[in-house]
Amino acid sequence: MKNKKLKNIFFIIVFLLVFTSLSYAEVVKKITIKGNQRVSNETIKVFSSIKVGDEITTDKLNEIVDNLYITNFFDNISTNFKNQELTIKVKESPIINKIDFKGVKSKTLIESIRKNLNLKSRSSYNKFQAETDMFQIISDLKNRGYYYSTVETFKEIKDNNSLNLVYKIDL
């Protein structure tokens, strides 16, 4: 009976030691950022809400990625933590040089459409927001009586990670 109690206590101690060591978070000693061109390292650190000396866990790594995606500055983000060094690798979203509308000659209609768009010139391109804007344009046109209008979105890729966004509208 005494041996059984000792075995149980031994297993409980081993169990606690194993799981407390697994939940131990390491401390960040160095942060390296790769892939950024326009957005500074400090800006990425601020948005990621991580600094040297912070404890890092898998939940914290996921939070860093989520925080950076929310900014809409990046198309792809990955993190790696090895030997107390956190590496954040980013691929920046292209910048929109200008937004053009083809197929509409009325300047007042274009200005009315433009003011309801989420994406603006000199902002980061986001495919989801471009599609949302396309549906907003269709909705605006229907409200003005153009019930059967169609809208297509085109990207004119430029150098230095920028683009022109073109909405082709058929009234």
Image (cartoon, grey):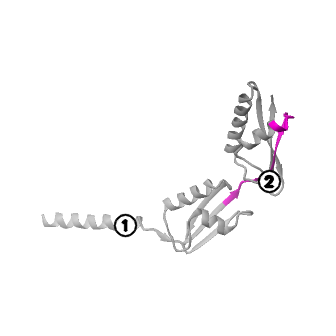
Q: CA distance from mark 1 to mark 2?
A: 49 Å
Q: Quadrant of residue 84?
A: bottom right
Q: Residue 101 lies in magenta, yes or no?
A: yes
Extreme-right residue of the structure = 105
Residue 170 location (% of width, % of height): 81, 29
Task: Give x and y (percent) for residue 108.
Answer: 82, 37
Do the residues under discs 1 and 2 have CB atoms within 8 angstroms? no
Disc 1 secondary structure class: helix
Q: Nearer the viewer, residue 108 or 162?
A: 108
Where residue 6 sits: x, y (%)? 19, 67
Quadrant where the C terminus sits is top right
Which residue lies under the disc numbered 1?
20
Q: Residue furthest front?
A: 108
Regarding mark 2 in the picture, which secondary structure is present there?
strand
- Above or below, 95 against 99 in this view is below
Do we see residue 167 in this rendering?
A: no
> Residue lying furthest left in this view?
1
* Magenta run includes residue 35: no
> Mark 1 or mark 2, which is nearer to you?
2
Residue underneath mark 2: 162
Magenta highlight range: 90-108
- The residue lying at 31 percent from left, 64 percent from top is 15
- 55 relative position to 106: left or right: left
Question: Which amino acid type corresponds to the residue marked 2 in the rendered image?
Answer: Ser
Badge 2 crowding class, 10 Å Cα cut-off, few under 14, some 14 to 19, many 20 or more, is many
What amino acid is at disc 1? Thr
91 on left or right of 18: right
Query: Which residue is painted at 67% across and 68% down in the image?
Result: 41
Residue drawn 37% across the image and 66% down it: 20
Q: Is residue 106 left or right of residue 93?
A: right
Q: Quadrant of residue 50?
A: bottom right
